[in-house]
Image (cartoon, rainbow, N blue to C red):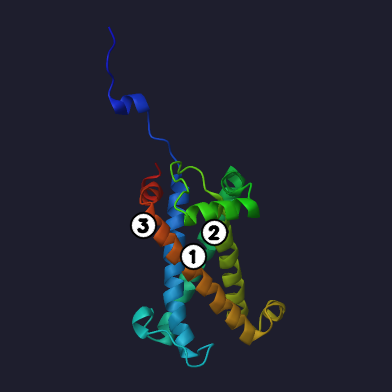
Amino acid sequence: MSTLLPASHMSGPAKTIQPAWVRISHWLNALAVILMVLSGWRIYDASPVFKGFVIPANFTLGGWLGGALQWHFAAMWLLFFNGLFYLAMNLVTGRFKRKFFPLSLRAIFHDLLDALKGRLSHADHSKYNAVQKFAYLFVMLDIAVLMLSGLAVWKSVQFPLLRDLFGGYDFARVVHFSAMSLVCAFIVVHVAMVALVPRSLLTMIRGR
């Protein structure tokens, strides 16, 4: 005589997709980036890189230049140390190679075309498609450029070689602003994708 088992029993325990260290560092990085962007906009308004273009005060953080700088540097250290932890853990655990590679231009264009046609599968949240791999690798590189260009602006006299690598103080500011803009673009696209596939948000909260 057969016995019917509950569905939850038959399916077994839920698989952990995102371990705790990934989830915690992800949300800390997100917090640090948002704080840096909002305070950075206030710093930018004090001396605009592009004349005639300023950020509305309601979208900035700090209230005044001194306050914005304090927020910016506090978030900078959070992003720096948490980012190093995230990168180190990805390398040590082998997650970096497992999650982001292999990757090719052919795969990126193929998955991008499928995404535009609404045919890209999101059934397996344990694997990134080629577009996700590229986007995450790109934002990691962009944040590195953001940090280095910011250092070239902040400590221009102490790091003259770094300043010169960015084309001088003024051009380092342009690079810093451009890198920030690309991070903002990534956030907009990332949030839009999460809205389309809300289960990915639950995965990053619960890990399963």
Q: What residue lies at 48% left-to-right and 57% top-to-bottom?
A: 116
Q: Is residue 181 visible?
A: yes
Tag 1: amino acid: Phe
In percent of width and height, residue 107 lies at: 61, 50
Considering every residue shown, the one lying at the far bottom of the view is 52
Q: What residue lies at 64% left-to-right and 46% top-to-bottom?
A: 102
Residue, disc 3: 195
SS at mark 2 in the image: helix
In the image, residue 150 above or below residue 50: above
In the image, residue 16 above or below residue 30: above
Residue, disc 2: 135
* Callout 1–callout 2 Cβ contact below 8 Å: yes
SS at mark 3 in the image: helix
Looking at the image, is mark 3 or mark 2 earlier in the sequence? Answer: 2
In percent of width and height, residue 57 lies at: 36, 85
Q: In which quarter of the image is residue 206?
A: top left
100 or 146, nearer to the observer? 100
* Callout 1–callout 3 Cβ contact below 8 Å: no
Residue, disc 1: 186
Q: Can residue 155 be seen in this view?
A: no
Judged left or right of residue 120, residue 194 is left
Looking at the image, is mark 1 or mark 3 earlier in the sequence? Answer: 1
